[in-house]
Image (tube, grey):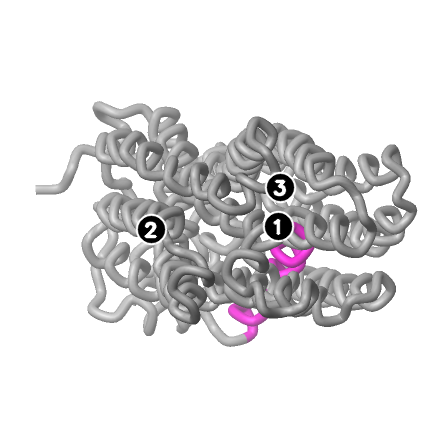
């Protein structure tokens, strides 16, 4: 017997809030690692390397999580289309919590030598697999419960989990580092935010277990190999959709993660000032998403996504030159600009990807594209930017990524006759 849907005992709004809560906790764990990579891990796990090489090594372990995300997307996507969205999301949250808690308990290089970075990478893989299942699944859980005229709005709730997770991670990280002596925080205090995730995950699991399966999944015809059927939408549509979403991921991770390392090591800016500024900008990002998703429901997402892609290109081109001024007010302006512009495309890209596929293979197809987009965009951006090193080189790189996404988005919307509630693709 099918589970009762949200149209019965559980209102869609409660489902949306549940997806927001779970996504926030997963992104908290993921971003906590990013902040620690930029500020701590080079000292704790790669102490024999130079500061630049240590940062590069720390960001390499950060990128490993993105490499693991497509694997998580494939596994969770398959079972999400076969047995349902709900249970796969419960398991993904559990995986992320276990990985983060164990990172908080992991001895450093001074204690166990080379095994420290090896185990760090392994735990990062676990985090990546967990988030690979969360990203698309939470989006579908909210969107497939939504009224037909509010699909963008409801799909935006789990998207809000990204900036909410960043704010929570940075707030905990900043609070811990503020109340402790700097030396103590560098040695052991950084572990506290990771260990806290054990308690947060318990809260998330209690909330997530109360949600119901989506009507779309309950009524969909199940297929044996969902990903195989998802690929039948065609290579052109798949490639253009993938390239259209990489810019937002790349720019967001340069803003959220790399700017912390760049600002402290290259520009000599205060660490707490940068973390606080990024956190405040993420608050703007969070509140911007419901505004943009409401506009998308009323006026359509195409024009909004294209305008947002142009704005992303423009601001990416000026972001690092603004940081290079080292002027406090200008740096704040650069960060606030990111907080206002990033949510324009981020708010609807999950819905755009989801509507590429029919309901019975939507989890598998969405997971593949979203996780590959995150890997090619956000996963590689901090690593490539650290290797480039210069402001002009980084600006050129990120501007090219944004240009590719903009051109791809134009091609995608020309290719598709419309962005409907259900894509014009026959189920297998």
**Measured along the vertical axis of the image, is residue 29 above or below residue 293?**
below
Circle 3 packing at 10 Å, graded few (<14), some (14-19), many (20+), is: some
Point out the tag, 3 or 1, that comes first from the N-terminus: 1
Q: Secondary structure at mark 1?
A: helix
Q: Toward the viewer: 211 or 37?
A: 37
Q: Of the numbered discs in the image, which one, if any, rests on residue 300?
A: 3
**Measured along the vertical axis of the image, is residue 14 above or below residue 63?**
above
Residues under labels 1 and 2: Cα distance?
19 Å
Residue 255 in view (yes/no): yes
**Measured along the vertical axis of the image, is residue 79 above or below residue 102?**
below
Q: Which residues are magenta?
A: 236-252
Q: Of the numbered discs in the image, which one, if any, rests on residue 39?
A: 1
Left/right placement of residue 68 relative to residue 372 reads: left
Q: Residue at x 58, y 69 (%)?
A: 48
Q: Is residue 241 part of the magenta span, yes or no?
A: yes
Query: Pointers 2 and 3 in contact (CB under 8 A)?
Result: no
Residues under labels 2 and 3: Cα distance?
44 Å
Rendered location of residue 266, percent (x, y):
80, 56
Q: Toward the viewer: 38 or 91?
A: 38
Please tell me whether mark 2 or mark 3 is closer to you in this view. 2
């Amino acid at each position: 017997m099918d589970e009762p849907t949200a149209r019965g005992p559980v209102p869609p709004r409660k489902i949306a809030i549940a997806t927001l809560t779970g996504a926030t906790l997963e992104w908290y764990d993921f971003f906590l690692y990013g902040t620690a990579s930029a500020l701590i891990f080079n000292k704790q796990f790669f102490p024999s390397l130079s500061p630049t090489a240590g940062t590069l090594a720390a960001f390499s372990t950060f990128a490993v999580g993105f490499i693991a995300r497509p694997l998580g997307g494939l596994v969770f996507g398959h079972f999400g289309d076969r047995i349902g969205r709900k249970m796969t999301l419960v398991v993904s949250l559990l995986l992320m919590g276990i990985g983060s808690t164990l990172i908080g308990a992991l001895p450093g290089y001074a204690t166990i030598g080379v095994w420290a970075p090896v185990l760090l990478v392994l735990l990062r893989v676990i985090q990546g697999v967990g988030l690979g299942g969360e990203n698309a699944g939470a989006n579908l859980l909210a969107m497939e419960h939504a009224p037909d005229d509010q699909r963008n709005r409801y799909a935006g709730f789990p998207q809000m989990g990204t900036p909410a997770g960043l704010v929570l991670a940075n707030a905990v990280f900043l609070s811990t580092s503020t109340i402790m002596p700097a030396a103590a925080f560098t040695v052991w205090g950084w572990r506290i935010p990771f260990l806290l995730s054990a308690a947060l995950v318990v809260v998330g699991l209690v909330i997530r277990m109360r949600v119901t399966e989506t009507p779309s999944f309950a009524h969909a015809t199940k297929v044996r190999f969902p990903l195989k059927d998802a690929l039948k939408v065609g290579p052109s549509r798949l490639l253009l959709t993938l390239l259209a979403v990489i810019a937002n991921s790349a720019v967001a991770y340069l803003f959220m993660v790399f700017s912390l390392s760049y600002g402290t090591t290259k520009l000599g800016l205060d660490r707490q000032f940068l973390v606080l500024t990024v956190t405040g900008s993420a608050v703007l990002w969070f509140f911007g998403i419901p505004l943009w998703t409401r506009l998308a429901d009323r006026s359509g997402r195409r024009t909004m996504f294209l305008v947002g892609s142009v704005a992303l290109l423009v601001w990416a081109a000026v972001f690092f030159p603004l940081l290079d001024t080292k002027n406090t007010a200008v740096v704040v302006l650069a960060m606030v600009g990111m907080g206002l512009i990033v949510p324009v495309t981020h708010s609807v890209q999950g819905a755009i990807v989801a509507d590429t596929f029919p309901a019975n293979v939507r989890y598998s197809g969405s997971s593949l594209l979203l996780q590959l987009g995150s890997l090619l965009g956000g996963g590689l951006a901090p690593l490539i930017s650290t290797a480039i090193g210069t402001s002009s080189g980084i600006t050129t790189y990120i501007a090219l990524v944004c240009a590719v996404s903009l051109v791809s988005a134009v091609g995608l919307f020309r290719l598709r006759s419309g962005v409907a509630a259900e894509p014009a693709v026959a189920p297998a």
